[in-house]
Amino acid sequence: MGRGTTPIESALRGRIPYGNDINPLSKALTKPRINPPSLNEIISRLSEIPWSQFKSIKNKKLLTFYHSKTLAQIEGLRLWLKKRKIQGKMDQIDCWIKMVAINRLTGHSPGFFSVYTLPPNQAVSIKSQKKINKKKQ
Ligand SMILES: C[S@@+](CC[C@H](N)C(=O)[O-])C[C@H]1O[C@@H](n2cnc3c(N)ncnc32)[C@H](O)[C@@H]1O
C-alpha cells in the first residue's frame, strides 16, 4: 500500500479497497483517507485536545529535529491518542489527526513540524541532522 494511492483511488471509483503492507504506518496513513471526517469535526476535536498541558519532553534526543515547544506538543498528542485508544474512544476523527501528524513529522516545506529535515525515505541520523542544523543557522 505504501501511502495508499491504489486503495484510495479504488475507493474513490466505488470499488472495495484491499491492501497490505509490512509497515504498520501504511494502514495509519491510508485508512483515515478512505472515509475522511468533515472539517468541522476535525476543528471541534482539535479544540478538545489539551495542548496547553503538553509541556514536558521525554525523548530529548529528538530536540535535534524539533523546537522544544513543538516536540512537547507532538509527544503530548501521541500520549493523548494512545490514551484514547486504550479507552476504546479512538474514532475516525482521531485517526485523521494522527494521519496528518505522522505526515507532518519530517520534511522541509513550510507546514512540517520539524526543523529542515529530509523526508522519511531519506531520514538521517542525529549526527547528520546536527550538521544540517549548523548549515541552516
Ligand atoms: C514503493 S512503496 C509503495 C508506494 C505506493 N504505491 C504509494 O503510492 O504510496 C512499497 C511498499 O511496499 C511495502 N513492502 C515491502 N515489502 C513488503 C512485504 N514483504 N509485504 C508487504 N509489504 C511490503 C513497503 O513497506 C512499502 O510501503
Image (cartoon, rainbow, N blue to C red):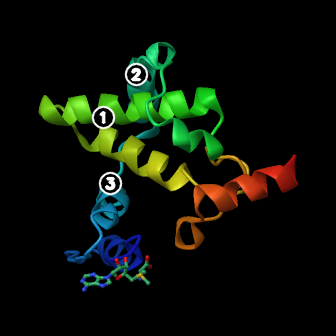
Mark 2 sits on what residue? 49
Q: Residues within 10 Å of mark 1 (few under 14, many from 20)?
A: some
Contact between marks 3 and 2 (CB within 8 A): the answer is no
Mark 1 element type: helix
The x, y position of residue 77, in whole percent, is 40, 32
Mark 2 element type: loop
Q: Is residue 60 left or right of residue 7?
A: right
The x, y position of residue 39, in whole percent, is 46, 38
Mark 3 element type: helix
The residue at the point 23 percent across, 29 percent down is 83
Look at the picture and state if 85 lies above or below 5: above
Looking at the rendered structure, the kind of residue marked 1 is Leu
Q: Residues within 10 Å of mark 3 (few under 14, many from 20)?
A: many
The residue at the point 51 percent across, 28 percent down is 72
Look at the picture and state if 33 lies above or below 60: below
Q: Nearer the viewer, mark 3 or mark 1?
A: 1
Look at the picture and state if 38 lies above or below 3: above
Mark 3 sits on what residue? 32
- Cα gap from disc 3 to disc 1, whole angstroms: 14 Å
Ligand 1 neighbours mark 1 (CB distance < 8 Å) = no
The x, y position of residue 91, in whole percent, is 23, 39
Q: Residues within 10 Å of mark 2 (few under 14, many from 20)?
A: some
Q: Is residue 47 left or right of residue 22?
A: right
Which quadrant does the N terminus fall into?
A: bottom left
Looking at the rendered structure, the kind of residue marked 2 is Ile
Contact between marks 3 and 1 (CB within 8 A): the answer is no
The image quadrant where one finds ligand 1 is bottom left
Mark 1 sits on what residue? 81
- Cα gap from disc 2 to disc 1, whole angstroms: 10 Å
